[in-house]
Image (tube, rainbow, N blue to C red):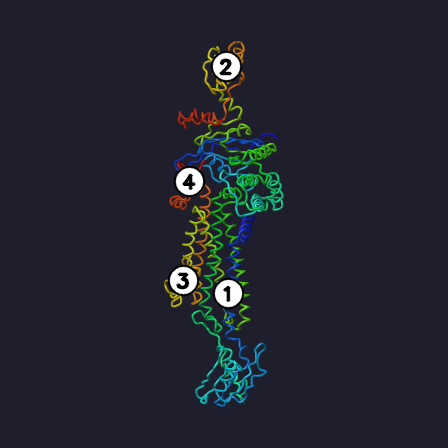
Amino acid sequence: MSQNHVVTVENISKTYGDFKAVSDLSFEVYSGEIFAMLGPNGAGKSTTIRMILDILKPDNGRITVLGMPMSDKIKDRIGYLPEERGLYRGVPVLEMMVYLGMLKGMSSADARKRSLAYLEQLELADFAKKKVSELSKGMQQKVQFAVTVLHDPDLIIIDEPFSGLDPVNTLLVKKLLLDFSKRGKAVIMSTHQMPQIEEMAERLLMINRGRNALYGKVDEVRQRYAPHAVRVQGQGDWAALPSVERVEAVEQTRGEVMLYMKASATPDTLLGEIAAAPNVHIRSFELAIPSLNEIFVQVVHDQGGIPAELIKAGGKAHA
Amino acid sequence: MHRIGLIARYEFLSNIRKRSFLVASIGMPIFTVIIFVIIALVAVDSETNVDRFAKVGMVDQSGVIANLAILDGTLAEGERPIEFIAFADANSARAALDASDIGAYFVLEADYYTTGRVVLVSSSGSPEALTDRLNLLLIRNLSTGIDPMLLERILDPTTRNVRDLSTGRLLPPEGIIFLVLTPIIFAAIFMIAGTTTSGYLMSGVVEEKTNRIMEILITAVTPMQLLAGKILGLGLLGLFQLVIWAVLGVVGGVLSQSLSSDVLSGFYIAPDLLALMIIYFLLGYFTLATVMAGIGAVVGSEQESRQFSGIVTLLFVVPFIAFVTFIIDPNGVVPTVLSIIPLTSPTSMIMRASFTIVPPEQLLLSLALLVAFNLLVLWVSARIFRLTLLLVGNPLSARQLLGLFRPRPVHSVLTAPTGEGSATT
């Protein structure tokens, strides 16, 4: 499918009292892609999502969803799963799903059919008649996910899709989200889980202090932040190599180090030097591409959001 | 409109199955009716049952009774005949009573004609029905030779209806008591039906707010639609509850009617009063429901919401503190003011209308204010709904609440989320 604009955000701003929650933010989301939205707590992600959903109105700027300004018809084509999510607890699962589906414009029969199909797919078919309160937390989250996508929305906005899910259910939901994007639907996911973004998302927007901090394809962003360095495992006197400017130990026991190269050097010349040096042995050699986590911490730090002494620890904590 | 209907249907169906609803609307009245019937059975039976008096002695020292068997064949169906047996003196009658040959005996003293004095000696109570039977026997014996129609008029010379001059209504003679009872019954039904359903409304809102399902709902419907759907659905539930009670009331009435024919014979509600009651009931319910929904949206927990709702409910009953004033001077200052102010007006106006003619301009003013107040509360509640969506689990502060009434966009009253991290993340 060609890249149609599903969401277009142009120069939106939002102020609460003296607090600028979002300022001059612009981005686009295309059909068929998984779009990640990330940023520190309080950066303005939820405010932005609420403005897309028309729960809040921006002070300035313009938002179009599915090619039009927001309307009830458009709202029916959006599926939204907020971060703090809830269900009616005292109601049978199926009945609640049908009700919420009908509120999104589905017919009763349609809502029932699709609810049953999703319950089947999410291995919850036996619980259709059970009350929500009788379900485990993980099961409830799967039901919430099913409710979000029940009406087959063209745009899915999902806040922390994997929080609280065990690895098996994470896989299940991940597969469903990828299926949706393959079918041409747009998925916006707001998350702190960088590995998930690296794995699933094509493009990302990082918001910091209400502003666009990073925006683009995930791969390109990582390339952009790549240091002029390679990461190697092995032994030898790395500093003696002509292309190496400085050495930084990454991991002692495995002998992993980061070799920062001189401006004139390339990874190829360095590899040649390693091969030629008799007392240097390597087990692995790779270009140093930073994790999103490292980039995240770096960007927030550069914009004055993190004290310098935290950055080293934080940057490597859970890459 | 379609979505409002959906919400209304869901609220109706999900609440009607609640155990508390079933208990309140079916269990409790059935229990009351059963208790009532049992008490009635016991009480009525002791007054009407003459089974244990199959034979009753008669010591007639006055000689007024010529024919002891005069009632034979004149009793209505189901009435057990009593065999009156003549005794020469009180001693022989007493001996027969002690030997259980008779259940009781009457002594008509020699000067009965002038004093009307009769002594009943009984070993097992003196039900009214037994006295009625003696009276009948005496009347029949005393009136031999009088034209039966004349006798009928002598016994019951008038058929009355009462014209209540303060309201101009024409009432059956027993209707007066119902005139006083009507506003009390109205208030009781209103309080029970109104508070149960609006209580559901409030706890529903609190639940949706605390479990954040509201945020999902709001991407499908507007706060106004949500509120309207809830009020409609739960209002229908309240009406359904009334229908159940009405049915049970009729059943109970029929039951007690079959026990004692004159319990409900004076039951009467003036049609104009009934119409007024329906109007005020609906408007009053609507006010209560919207206020409760607003409270539910503002407060943080269900427990807290109950305290607030108690205060609101109290306002509806305040007029009853002045019940006596309403009876003595229904057009006085206090009743007039209470019947015009929204919240106290539904119960107050029904009380006044029961006891007097309310000047039409006051009635119109009261209704207009109630409608205006409803719209205001609905508007404020919808704004509170919208505003609370933006706060996660935090109750509104007084400042934010006041901000609702300022002519600014509602979300701009939110303060910066520093420290709370709740308004935005």
**Residue carrying label 4:** B412
Tell which tag, 3 or 2, sits nearer the viewer. 2
Q: Are marks 1 and 3 in contact (CB under 8 Å)?
A: no
**Residue A52 coordinates in the image, percent (x, y):** 50, 36
Tell which tag, 4 or 2, sits nearer the viewer. 2
Chain for numbered disc 4:
B
**Residue B67 coordinates in the image, percent (x, y):** 55, 88
Q: Are marks 1 and 4 in contact (CB under 8 Å)?
A: no
Disc 1 residue crowd, few under 14, some 14–19, many 20+, Cα 10 Å: few
Task: Tell me, yes or no, whether dots 4 and 3 are on the same chain.
Answer: yes
Tag 1 secondary structure: helix
Chain for numbered disc 3:
B
Looking at numbered disc 4 in the image, what kind of residue is underneath it? Ser
Task: Tell me, yes or no, whether dots 1 and 2 are on the same chain.
Answer: no
Query: Between disc 1 and disc 4, whose residue precedes?
Result: 1
**Residue B97 coordinates in the image, percent (x, y):** 50, 82
Chain for numbered disc 2:
A
Query: Between disc 1 and disc 3, whose residue precedes?
Result: 1
Chain for numbered disc 1:
B
Tag 3 secondary structure: helix
**Residue carrying label 3:** B320
**Does residue A252 lie above or below B120 as drawn?**
above
Disc 3 residue crowd, few under 14, some 14–19, many 20+, Cα 10 Å: some
Looking at numbered disc 2 in the image, what kind of residue is underneath it? Gln
**Residue carrying label 2:** A235
Task: Tell me, yes or no, whether dots 4 and 2 are on the same chain.
Answer: no
Q: Residue at x 43, y 50 (%)?
A: B305
**Does residue B187 lie above or below B401 as drawn?**
below
Separation (CA) of disc 1 from disc 3: 27 Å
Task: Tell me, yes or no, whether dots 1 and 4 are on the same chain.
Answer: yes
**Residue carrying label 1:** B35
**Residue B75 coordinates in the image, percent (x, y):** 57, 80
